[in-house]
Amino acid sequence: MRLNQLEERVGDRISIEWKSFLLRAEPKTGDREKFVEYTKSWLNPAAQEPDAEFQVWASDASQPTSSIPAQVAWRIVQDMEPDLAEAFHWRLLRAYFSENRNISEGEELVALAVEVGVDEDRFRQAAAEQGDSWAQAVIDEHNAAIQNGVTAVPTVVFADVFPIPGAQPVETYERILEKLEAKRV
C-alpha cells in the first residue's frame, strides 16, 4: 500500500519489483489455536496501515501450510499475464489477510487467478508444466534475499544494495530516495 503511494508521489523516479520471500518455506501443519493466536499480531500493522484490511483468522478454512504455492501461482500469472500480475498479488494478500482463505491450496489459487481475469485452463496447464521450475526459482530468490541480509517482510531495497526492513512511512522512503538521488548528482 505504502509503495503504491510512493510510486504515485514520485512517478518514474522509482521502479518497484516484487520478489519472493517465504514466510513458511517448509510445508508444515501447525496447531490451529496457535495459528489463530498468531494472526492476532496482524492487528498491529492493521492499526498502522489504514488502507490494509487484516482480520484475525476466523474462517473454517485450514491455515496455509507453505508460502511456496502462492508464490509459484503469482510467478505463473506474472509470466503468462503480466498485466494481471499486480492485481493477482493484491488479490492473494487480501484473500489471506482479510478473507482468511488458504492460499497454499491449489484450487483456491486457481479460483483467485480466475477472479482477476486469468484463463483457468491456461493457468492449470502452466501450473502443471512449469510449477516445479517456478518453485525452484522462488526458493532461489528467497535464498538470495537471505544471503543479502533480508530478514523481514516487507523489506524495501533501494539501488539493489540498501535494505530497509519493516513497513515505513511513505515520507521515510521519499527521504531515502532523495538522498540516493543527491549522491548520484
Image (cartoon, helix red, strand yellow):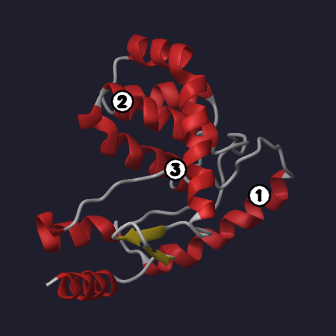
Amino acid type, mark 3: Ser
How many numbered markers are drawn? 3
Observer-nearest of 149 and 86: 149
Residue 140: quadrant of the picture: top right
- At a point 57% along the width and 55% down the height, the residue shown is 144
Considering only order in the chain, which callout, 1 or 3, is on the residue closer to the N terminus? 3
Q: Quadrant of the N terminus?
A: bottom left
Distance (Cα) linking label 3 and label 1: 22 Å
According to the picture, the residue beneath numbered tag 3 turns out to be: 20
Foreground disc of the pair 1, 2: 2
Judged left or right of residue 100, residue 26 is right
- The CA span between labels 1 and 2 is 32 Å
Instruction: Tell me which residue sits at (26%, 83%) in the image.
Output: 180
Locate residue 18, reporting x and y percent: 40, 53
Badge 2 is on which residue? Answer: 79
Q: Is residue 95 above or below residue 159?
A: above
Q: Secondary structure at mark 1?
A: helix
Q: Which mark is residue 35?
A: 1
Task: Estimate the x, y position of residue 102 in percent, counting from the top left.
Answer: 63, 40
Q: Position of residue 14 (x, y in %)?
A: 21, 66
- Asked if the residue under mark 1 is in contact with the one under mark 3, i.e. CB atoms within 8 Å, the reply is no
Residue 86 lies, with reference to residue 38, above or below; the image says: above
Secondary structure under the numbered disc 3 in the rendered image? loop
Query: For the residue carrying disc 1, how many other residues have a C-alpha within 10 Å: few (<14), some (14-19), or many (20+)?
Result: some
The amino acid type, in three-letter code, at marker 2 is: Asp
